[in-house]
Amino acid sequence: MRQENREEHPVPERVVETVIALGDGRRQWGTGYLIADRVVLTARHLVVDANGTPGRVAVQGMFSSESLSAKVVWTPADTTIDVALLELPTPLARLKNVCWGRIDGGRPREVSGIGFPRRQGRDPGGARHSDQLWGRVTLQPRRNVLSVDVGGATRRAPDMRDGPEQIPRWQTSQWGGASGTALFCGPHLVGVLSRDADPDTYDGTRLHAVPVSAWWDDPEFVRHRQRLGLDPHRYPVPDSTADTTAAASSLTRTSTEEDLRVAMAQQISAFTSGWHGVSEEADQALDVHCSAVGGEEYARNAQAIPITHDSIHAYYLALSPRRLVITGPSGSGKTILALRLMRQLLDMPGQPVPVYFNLAAWRVPSADIRRMPADARPAALAKCFEGWLVDQLLENDLVVTRREASRLVAGRRILPVLDGMDQILPDTASAEPFSPGQNAVLDDLVCALNNYRDIHGGSRGAFVLATRARKDVESETCDLSLPEGSVVQVERLTWRQIQERLESGRGPRDQETNTPVDWGPVLEDIAAHGDQSVAARRLDTPWKLTLAEWAAASRHVRPAYLITDDASDAEVEEKLLASFVPSVHGYHSVHTTGTSGKNPQQAMSWLTVLAQHLEQSRGTVHGVPLSGREVVLARIWPVAGTWRVRFAHLAVHFVPLVLFGLACVIAAVTGPGHAGDFFTGHWPALTGATGTRLKAAAGLSGALLLAGAYFALRYWPWMPPTHWPLLAFAQRRTQGLRIRRGPRRIVSGLEIGSAIGLGVGMTVMLACGWVFGIAAGAVVAALFGWFMEAKVGLDRTLSGNFNPEFFWALDMLGAAVFAGIGALAFPLLDYSWTTGLAFGGCFGFVLGFGFFLVPWLRYITAMTLARKQLPWRLAAFLDWARKAGLMTISGVGFQFRHQELQEWIVRKGPPSASA
């Protein structure tokens, strides 16, 4: 049975809005789908009146300004089957027939559809905005119903906060108006959306649809199906859990999204782990409260929802469109609120995968875009933004191939959660009014966000943006010109929140007595003066409160100092920042394993070098955009001097290459293992086969030296091609490698030892013979396999060599390629093809290892030269800093826990620590 149409659905051009005039002068809107040139499939209750009589129906395409009359040609005799066929007088477009799908069994399938829910509103021309529906569908055979789990609440039950005028609105489904939406599993049409499931039973997260099997055998439908030339077959929808080729090919998108969900869950956990670092209870973020300060017209369905850590997802899902800007003063918890929203959305099936992006790495648009006409630039900037999202997915190793990343972005299967706009704002603390022309980079970004659309280009695309308030005062709101989006502001902590936190004892304990800190003076000040107290003013954000807790626990600052009138607010904050690193070091140098430095001064010196390096390298450097926030080990090497490191790298390349080239020449002239004859001058005549071998050895040595010089002197080391489709099967996420369990360390050590040992063994064998070669290779393999993995294995993991399995695959690929070349080339040198096969395989394995080792070797060279400024095992120090709460993990790099901490270190760090 052949399927004639395998295009992916739903297609926006096929979606239509249906309108029927009711007898009392009212009209009813719904959704339909063109399943053929002149045939629309929709829900029955949208095209009949209260008596069940078909009415006069008009349909209008999503991108059409005209409506057409449609005739109801079929509705089932069974009125419980909520489906209908409409026939148009003229075709809206030349379309292929859709494929009907049959769901067998009770396993859930991924479905999607496009409908016109009433909450989307209309544009000035009267066209209703559409929305994409994703969910998991399950067949209930006894009831002949498809249950569609959409994850987010479709409605909310009224509560005591709602007034009488709000209750009817809450009782209206968020998907009202989307009835009639055609649901697709890949290319197969499997059902028609009908109604909400019982909200009391399913808490408003489930919809009901009519499966194709419910009406397939209806005699009238069969007759019309034949008359209209519709597809006469139903095709089985592959089971997502079946181990078949068809299922695997159709579920590429789903498996990619699931991998992405797991990766983002790991990243969120890694981002916030260790922020208090004293107990699981202390790691719980202090809850915040927010208030809507802009875009209220787009949050009509969310006005009664309080915005806290626990309810931010409900507020977001009620927005239309789902564009949320989170603003607030520095340290108020904007990033934590955005991460909490991400964590909640990750657990909701059917929702796009929320992905964290740091806007500090925003790519400056090309000059060609800037020269475009004004009317063409917005669309080009939106494309530039989408391309940047794709690049970030790849650079942070969240997906494997560019094709997968492009599909996720183009299909709007990811929700961009954007942070770090503070890095490109002109002056977030300035009291001067902000002019959009001040910063062309920011203007381009805002324009790109404004024109970022949904999958079909109609409504505004969804995203979440966290940015600092303009003047860093509570009354200041975000003034970014983002249309059709809701703006919420994180409020400062109230005196009651501060009081409850200090009284709870969940913060760090006194480092000398291991008892809760005595906050008596501060609590007395809060109890006496409430919001007017000095403590409430100086500890009004979670970040300031955290600084105070650590400073008091280490006794660098007495609690009474926090409320003294002898110091200004700025002086108190300065002292809290100055005591943070020593306070954290005093606790975690004892309780946390890792490289922490001999004393707080040394740790502070290392952090200063990193912070100043990030500040100096911000921007585009040799074609690579650097955010100025993330410490990526593969790009940290300029801290030791760019030319200094590259010349040292060149020397590191030349020494083994010269020795190997010399060994090849010895083997070519006097034969393998006859170095004595070579150096004593007992050479044969350099003619015939010997002359040819000498030329080949010299050519190979020269080529290796030229390649070594090129890769050593280029500015950015050539990174491993982790996105080659041929090698995609071996790529993994880096977050799991930070655990580095035993088996993986053994695999990594074997790869390092075998490659280095094989290279040394080949060189010695060519010069001194088999026995010495095998002995030297075995000793070197054992020593290097243990030493390199045990001492700098973590650094290798984080400096560009992400996965031992991946590099085993690259090494074996090199071995296979050069084994074939050796088998073909060695007979030309009067050697057997088996000798060429063996030599080429060994040479390719070592070459693959060395070729893809360049980023790590550059990093090790730089760390060796920067021993006075940074620890040699920098990754071990960064990992300790993460556990101690000084750094966080961001993608494949580290960043300072708070931007204010990084800025203070740059401003106040010891000048002698600067690289």
Image (cartoon, rainbow, N blue to C red):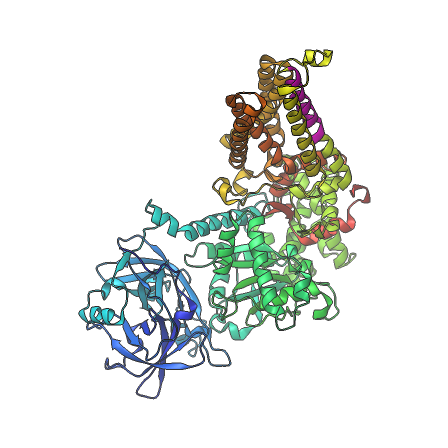
* Residue range highlighted in magenta: 653-670
- For the question of whether residue 461 can be seen, the reply is yes
Of residues 17 and 655, which is closer to you in this image? Answer: 655
- Chief secondary structure of the magenta span? helix
Quadrant in the picture for the N terminus: bottom left
The answer to whether residue 98 is above or below residue 656 is below
Report the residue that reaches farthest toward the right.
912
Position of residue 518 measured from the top left corner of the image (x, y, whole percent): 64, 48
Residue 669 belongs to the span the image colors magenta:
yes
| 819 is within the stretch colored magenta | no
Q: Which quarter of the image is occupied by the C terminus?
A: top right
In the drawing, does residue 563 fall left or right of residue 591?
Answer: right
Image position, residue 392 (x, y; %):
58, 52
Relative height, residue 481 to residue 639 (above, below): below
x and y percentages locating residue 143 in the rendered image: 23, 62
Residue that appears at 52% across and 27% down: 823
Q: Is residue 210 shown left or right of residue 837? A: left
Q: Is residue 518 visible?
A: no
Tell me which corner region of the image, top left, top right, bottom left or bottom right, holds residue 425: bottom right
Identify the residue at the far left of this view. Answer: 219
Q: Quadrant of residue 65?
A: bottom left
> Which of 598/569 is in front?
598
- The extreme front residue here reads 688
Image spot of residue 589 (x, y percent): 65, 36
Count numbered badges in the picture: 0
Q: Quadrant of residue 78?
A: bottom left
